[in-house]
Amino acid sequence: ILTVVHAVVHARFIKL
């Protein structure tokens, strides 16, 4: 689960 959250946060950060 942590891996998924990390991936989502990373993608969100890049999108920002």
Image (tube, rainbow, N blue to C red):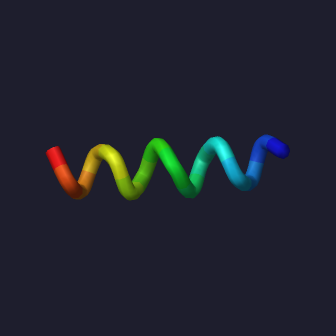
**Which quadrant, please, contains the N terminus?**
top right
Relative height, residue 16 to residue 14 (above, below)? above
Q: Is residue 11 left or right of residue 16?
A: right
- Report how many numbered discs are placed on residues in the image: 0
Check the image and name the residue furthest to the right.
1
Residue drawn at (60%, 47%) of the image? 6
Residue at position x 38%, y 57% in the image: 11
Q: Is residue 7 above or below residue 1?
A: below
Residue furthest left as drawn: 16
* Residue 14 x, y percent position in the rendering: 24, 56
Q: Residue at x 42, y 52 (%)?
A: 10
Residue 16 placement: quadrant: top left
